[in-house]
Image (cartoon, grey):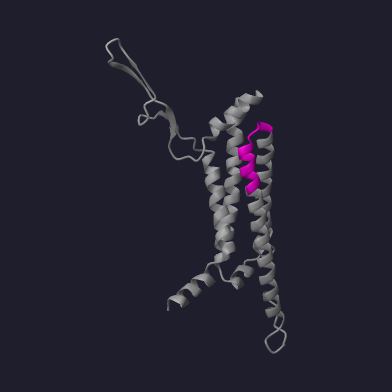
Amino acid sequence: MMKGFFIRIDKCVNLIVILFLFWGVFWILNGADKFMDGELKPNYSLLKAVLTDTDGVVTHQFYPTDTFGWYGVNRNIQVNSYFNRLSLPKGAIYPMLYITGVIEIILGSAFLILFVWSLFPQEKRENLGGLFKNRTLHRLAFKGSTLVFVFFSFADIIFGDRIELWEHGTFIILCLITYDMWYRSDQFFQKMRKSKIETTPSGSPFLEE
């Protein structure tokens, strides 16, 4: 009984569908991060230093400041340090971050749409037509992701951030691997579907859709 249950789970859960979900959530969270910097506040849980009077009584306490709130990385502070290093105008920081965030959210939305599309039965998916049937939306999502990572990598080289460059290079490889997995599996299933449409088990031709 348990064996049959796990077999059904394996048949229902497609690895490509999981990767569509991953990229959708990945891009939307990264895009939203550009709009949420958190708030810089003193961290009262970490005492940094104290001042005392001549009697040894503490008169002042010093605490470090940390960023609190819903955010991944405070991109404003990070990009601000980049711009200071190259003497670039700080007025361009927020427009650049917001434009990048919007692009990332659009990419994430595209992958989430593909995730939902992949949950439908194959015949219903193919009957939707448009950008789905000719796989235009799929290719645009992957091409857009690769272009964004390439742009980030160029920026990392200019700003001298080798850690970010390593991360973005890793994501480019992951994106290309995902594309290769999707393309190969999609071609395989399309050939299977085409062979079923062209002939019946007895060899008689099917009616065209």
What secondary structure do most residues of the magenta stretch adopt?
helix
Q: x, y percentage for residue 108?
A: 57, 51
The stretch of residues the image draws in magenta is 158-170
Image point 66% across, 51% down: which residue? Answer: 173
**Quadrant of the image containing the N terminus:** bottom left
Q: Residue furthest top?
A: 54
Q: Nearer the viewer, residue 7 or 94?
A: 7
Image point 69% across, 90% down: which residue? Answer: 202
Image point 69% across, 58% down: which residue? Answer: 136
Q: Nearer the viewer, residue 130 or 97?
A: 97
Position of 101 with respect to 150 (left or right) is left
Residue 137 appears anywhere in the view: no
Image point 52% across, 70% down: which residue? Answer: 10
Position of 38 with respect to 19 (left or right) is left
- Residue 149, picture quadrant: top right
**Quadrant of the image containing the C terminus:** bottom right
Q: x, y percentage for residue 152?
A: 65, 40
Q: x, y percentage for residue 39?
A: 44, 32
- Residue 204, picture quadrant: bottom right
Residue 122 higher or lower than 200, as above or below:
above
